[in-house]
Image (spheres, rainbow, N blue to C red):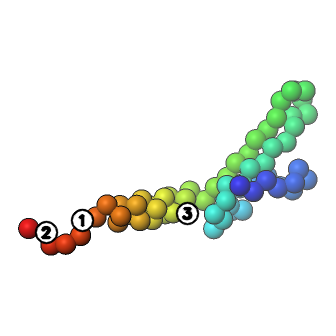
Amino acid sequence: MIIPAVDEDPPSNVSSAGQADIQLWVKPDLVQPNGIWIWAAADNLRISALTAVECAETMMATRPTGKIQ
């Protein structure tokens, strides 16, 4: 997870493209004393692809070996 400094721009679709990490930004709300703003962005295509590869690797371990009759 990447948490940029408060003075940096919040994460966006553009800044998260190609990144493996989830970008998170937290900023205090100036109107509500106990409030905060949270921005989060992630490259959902990359995360889905990594999950698919991990599932395939896990399934390879359960694949039967030998001849199928």
Determine which residue is flagged by label 3.
Answer: 46
Q: Quadrant of residue 64?
A: bottom left
State whether residue 7 appears in this view: yes
**Left or right: 34 as drawn, with respect to 19:** right
Q: Residue at x 35, y 64 (%)?
A: 61
Q: Residues within 10 Å of mark 2 (few under 14, many from 20)?
A: few
Identify which residue, 9 or 22, lies in the foreground: 22
Tell me: residue 2, above or below residue 30.
Answer: below
Question: Looking at the image, do the residues carrying marks 2 and 1 touch, with CB atoms under 8 Å apart?
Answer: yes
Determine which residue is flagged by label 1.
Answer: 64
The amino acid type of the residue labelled 3 equals Arg
Element class at badge 3:
helix
State whether residue 45 appears in this view: no
Outermost residue, bottom side = 67
Element class at badge 2:
loop
Q: Residue at x 86, y 27 (%)?
A: 34
**Left or right: 10 as drawn, with respect to 44:** right
Q: In the rendered image, which quarter contains the C terminus?
A: bottom left
Q: CA distance from mark 3 to mark 1?
A: 30 Å
The amino acid type of the residue labelled 1 equals Pro
| Label 2 vs 3, first from the N-terminus | 3
Q: Residue at x 55, y 59 (%)?
A: 47
From the top left corner, tell me how far across and down residue 44 is, in percent: 56, 56
From the top left corner, tell me how far across and down residue 14 is, in percent: 69, 62
Determine which residue is flagged by label 2.
Answer: 68
The amino acid type of the residue labelled 2 equals Ile
Q: Quadrant of residue 4?
A: bottom right
Element class at badge 1:
loop
Outermost residue, left side = 69
